[in-house]
Image (cartoon, rainbow, N blue to C red):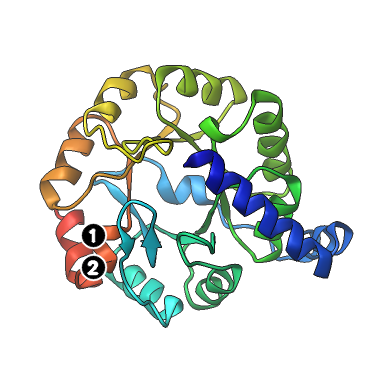
């Protein structure tokens, strides 16, 4: 599944490149206002922080929510206490777009993450051109050379990189990059199976100066509490927020 998602996202990016050249999107990225300091916004605090996600669908659950107004949803998240907004921009299975990201960026003052299956420089330049402050890189989807090149490019463009892992080996690869924001996804993106214990297994191996993000498997406040107890600085939540009242649900997660 992960290979298919990554290949599809690359094909779609190449199609967009036919309309807007690499040189043009690079120029747009370099002309964009500076990215916000997402690392500071997400660093460990007295309470867990939340990256709240704009997410219409997923391969594992299918349709989740219409979200006709992604910017309005992001504003609700901001009002509810989120520390950053994640926007799914993959169109085939998650039904997102870069237009969603642009509209969210126009509405909120929080850092905004482009969440997609990034495998080529064009997609990184696109993210910055759309004024993303963070970009997701999935270790399992990339060889180390490509991962390193995209990490360096993202950093040079001023963005914070959320480097996502799902095993001890992937965590080691992320730390070798010098990643300062590391995610542990409970969902195996090859099979879409969940392992709720994975974050607790890997967190002790993450250095204290690295911001730790727990991803997936959050449906109730007790899930957030368990992640926090295991050492999470940040929890990324999508499905539970888009399928319930976003503000009250987010507030309940932040109250743990």
Q: Relative to 101, is 50 on the left or the right?
A: left
Residue depicted at x 47% and y 67%? 95
Residue depicted at x 72% and y 49%? 157
Image disc number at residue 186: none
Residue 160 location (% of width, % of height): 58, 45
Q: Is residue 181 visible?
A: yes
Number of other residues with Cα within 10 Å of mark 2, as a class: few under 14, some 14 to 19, many 20 or more: some
Q: Nearer the viewer, residue 213 or 211?
A: 213
Residue 15 location (% of width, % of height): 75, 62
Residue 228, compared with residue 99, is above or below; it is above
Residue depicted at x 23% and y 46%? 47
Q: Relative to 175, is 67 on the left or the right?
A: left
Q: Relative to 116, is 129 on the left or the right?
A: right
Q: How many marks?
A: 2
**Quarter residue 34 falls in:** bottom right
**Quarter residue 142 falls in:** top right
The secondary element bearing badge 2 is classed as loop
**Quarter residue 168 falls in:** top left
Residue 188, compared with residue 219, is above or below; it is above
Number of other residues with Cα within 10 Å of mark 1, as a class: few under 14, some 14 to 19, many 20 or more: some
For the residues labelled 1 and 2, the Cα–Cα distance comes to 6 Å
Farthest residue in the left direction? 222
Residue 217 location (% of width, % of height): 24, 44
Mark 1 and mark 2 in contact? Answer it, CB < 8 Å. Answer: yes
Q: Nearer the viewer, residue 20 or 4?
A: 4
Residue 249, compared with residue 122, is above or below; it is below
Q: Is residue 136 visible?
A: no
Residue depicted at x 11% and y 45%? 222
Name the residue tied to disc 1. Answer: 240
The secondary element bearing badge 1 is classed as helix
Residue 88 location (% of width, % of height): 48, 60
Name the residue tied to disc 2. Answer: 243
């Amino acid at each position: 599944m992960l290979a298919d998602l990554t290949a599809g996202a690359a094909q779609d990016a190449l199609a967009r490149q036919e309309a807007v050249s690499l040189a043009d999107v690079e120029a747009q990225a370099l002309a964009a206002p500076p990215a916000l300091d997402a690392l500071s916004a997400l660093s460990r605090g007295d309470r867990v922080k939340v990256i709240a996600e704009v997410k219409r669908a997923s391969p594992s659950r299918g349709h989740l929510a219409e979200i006709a107004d992604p910017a309005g949803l992001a504003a609700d998240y901001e009002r509810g206490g989120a520390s950053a907004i994640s926007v799914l921009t993959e169109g085939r299975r998650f039904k997102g777009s870069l237009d969603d990201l642009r509209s969210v960026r126009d509405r909120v003052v929080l850092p905004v993450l482009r969440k997609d299956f990034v495998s080529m420089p064009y997609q990184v330049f696109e993210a910055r051109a759309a004024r993303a402050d963070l970009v997701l890189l999935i270790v399992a989807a990339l060889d180390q050379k490509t991962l390193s090149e995209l990490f360096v490019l993202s950093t040079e463009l001023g963005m914070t990189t959320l480097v996502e892992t799902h095993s001890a080996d992937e965590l080691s690869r992320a730390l070798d990059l010098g990643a300062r924001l590391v995610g542990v996804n409970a969902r195996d993106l090859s099979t879409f199976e969940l392992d709720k214990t994975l974050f607790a297994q890997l967190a002790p191996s993450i250095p204290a100066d690295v911001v730790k993000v727990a991803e997936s498997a959050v449906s109730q406040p007790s899930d957030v509490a368990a992640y926090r107890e295991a050492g999470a600085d940040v929890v990324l939540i999508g499905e539970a927020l888009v399928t319930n009242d976003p503000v009250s649900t987010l507030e309940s997660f932040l109250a743990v």
